[in-house]
Image: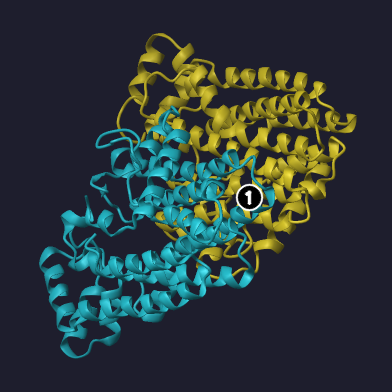
Chain colours: A yellow, B cyan
Amino acid sequence: MSDFDSGIPSRLKSYREKVSDSLESYLGSKKGKTYDMVNYHLGFNGEGSDGNLQGKAIRSSLALYATEALGGDPNEALPAALSLELIHNFSLVHDDIQDDDRTRRGRPTVQYKWSPDQAINAGDALKDLSLLVMLDLSRDGESGKTLEALAALSEYSLRMIQGQVLDLDYMERRDVDIDSYLEMISAKTCALLEGAFHLGGIYSSAGEDELEKLISFGRYLGYVYQIRDDWLGIWGQPEESGKSALSDIEEKKRSFPVVYALQGGHGEELTRLKELYYSEGKLGEDKIEEVKEILEEIDASKKTNEWAEKYWNHAVRELHETGMADWAKTELKEFGSFLLTRKQ
Amino acid sequence: MSDFDSGIPSRLKSYREKVSDSLESYLGSKKGKTYDMVNYHLGFNGEGSDGNLQGKAIRSSLALYATEALGGDPNEALPAALSLELIHNFSLVHDDIQDDDRTRRGRPTVQYKWSPDQAINAGDALKDLSLLVMLDLSRDGESGKTLEALAALSEYSLRMIQGQVLDLDYMERRDVDIDSYLEMISAKTCALLEGAFHLGGIYSSAGEDELEKLISFGRYLGYVYQIRDDWLGIWGQPEESGKSALSDIEEKKRSFPVVYALQGGHGEELTRLKELYYSEGKLGEDKIEEVKEILEEIDASKKTNEWAEKYWNHAVRELHETGMADWAKTELKEFGSFLLTRKQ
């Protein structure tokens, strides 16, 4: 069992299985090169596949979990949750092209196994399938809710893309501070987590006020998730995260520790860090080590975790204001504590 | 006035203006880098922009035109038609990356003006906007029709992507014949034209049988359009088509004249054509000329036009079976004759 599995409430894990099984039964047997790429990426076929959905399916599981915790019927929310999962996966396939990543979840990426051009198509197909799974499987549902969920998901998906645009943009800019970093991850990462709780609200008929609290909880959870992810990108163990070691530094990503150091550092360390990050091209191995040393001098590891904790405290405040059942509040609090210290 | 403008029925032209104005008012004033790219591509801002939608908007105009010709209300179909237009445009932005095209409609492509990575995002954003424009603008419409149109558009969009997958795949294969070519363009090109007439059917409440005729007309129109497009890619005037001269040959695209020649040619010409097309890398200038000479030897120019005519005859047969008004049948027949001989 992976570290991440051990930190997930068991009810969330069972929803993840439901998502995996439902997607496999919707997509797994479809044929042709487009579906080969799609099913390979999802983990339903090809080398290293065990027939289950790869990845944590955290967003879709949370959507079903929230629906139950709010007194709704998770089966009614299932098509929208599957849609959310495919939206997330379409973004991963395109992200792997943009980051030139060779592996994802320990397997060759679509762009590396086929080609970047075909990976563009595979991501595009996943996007259309995110709609089709929703429309096909919710034919018996209330069309008002289906349209509401579709509109919400499209808004979140667009915001996620706007976050990707900023993320790429930041790598060429010299003025990225913590505020602009938060603006970027609020779009890139938080949007789909807000979407998960928003769906929970739609399928439990939550009112406007409660929807806002749910969305806000999703947003803070997204901050915690991404800031810790950025920490792991530098101080995590590569064999555990499944990412290549230190690629965030190599690519000069404006991840939280770096943004913190560029804003909060001073003296020689700051000057040298700027020299390294504002240079052309990727950073070589010795320079990656140098960046790590500078970040440690500036105390960026500890501060990064402190910022994640700060947002987790915000999240807990919102959580208590939602109408989720007590068992869910308790489990989500444990889940949050786990996210703050997760190793992968 | 361009050659294409002169061949379009005036009613179709006025729908094109409606599409342009509606999209401009929905998107034109939105801010941020994502919208900058989107609006630049559409022609609403940036260098070489006159504030109008670039491109022929043929699919969306035909959807509105068909709705009117079938006795429906084009205003009711407008959100779906705009959605169709944005789906087409999302595919163009991604296609320009895959084909490494530097110009589109006489202006730098998004991938060239920003970067291929950002163009992936711009295309993705256009895809989400294709949904949002539909959902935002059809809030007062019948939700049943909205869901029906969304499902149809998603199916066509997915088929278009499957066509793109085949198109890229074919460039690495040696067994592409006319049948497999038709399978590819039926997906890549015909899908969205089928979609245009399908939308006309949805918004005029056509029955199942009539829908089939409409879709079938759209498909044959797609064959005609693409086969002539392939002809133009070799024998068209670059200043008129807006494409770089002979890039189809340079890239060794399996366009109709080439597929015809590979299947129908023989002797020395065929051997040499295979040598050229089954080699690695792009073709240089002298080899492009050689390919042109071989194609002329094999009579591929004339045969290409004959195939387009054959499909136009099929189209006309279907057209007569649809319930479109007589004025529309007459105009669409003129339009078809124009498509067969268009210069751009």
Number of marks drawn? 1
Q: What element does badge 1 sit on? A: helix
B99 to A223, vertically: above or below: below
Residue B332 sits above or below residue B318 on the image? above
Residue B110, picture quadrant: top left
Q: Is residue A7 left or right of residue A232?
A: right
Is residue B342 visible in the rendered structure shown here?
yes
Q: Quadrant of the C terminus of chain B?
A: bottom left
Q: What x and y, as percent, mark residue B20?
A: 39, 42
Residue that sits furthest to the front in the current view: B326
Describe residue A164's horizontal placement relative to residue A26 as left or right: left
The subunit carrying tag 1 is B
Q: Position of residue B284 (x, y in %)?
A: 15, 64
Three-letter amino acid code at the position of disc 1: Thr
Q: Is residue B196 left or right of residue B225?
A: right
Q: Is residue A50 left or right of residue A73?
A: left
Which image quadrant for residue B180?
Answer: bottom left
* Outermost top residue: A267
Q: Could you tell me residue B283's position as x and y percent?
A: 19, 66
Nearest the viewer among B114 and A182 is B114
Q: Is residue A79 above or below residue B166?
A: above
Residue in the image at 62% along x and 60% along y: B205
Residue A60 vertical position relative to residue B161 in the rendered view, above or below: above
Report x, y in % for residue A255: 50, 28
Look at mark 1 in the image and give the residue it sits on: B146
Q: Nearer the viewer, residue A265 or B99?
A: B99
On the question of residue A54 being in view, the answer is no
User: Which residue lies at the image location 57% right of the left edge and 40% below the top edge?
Assistant: B137
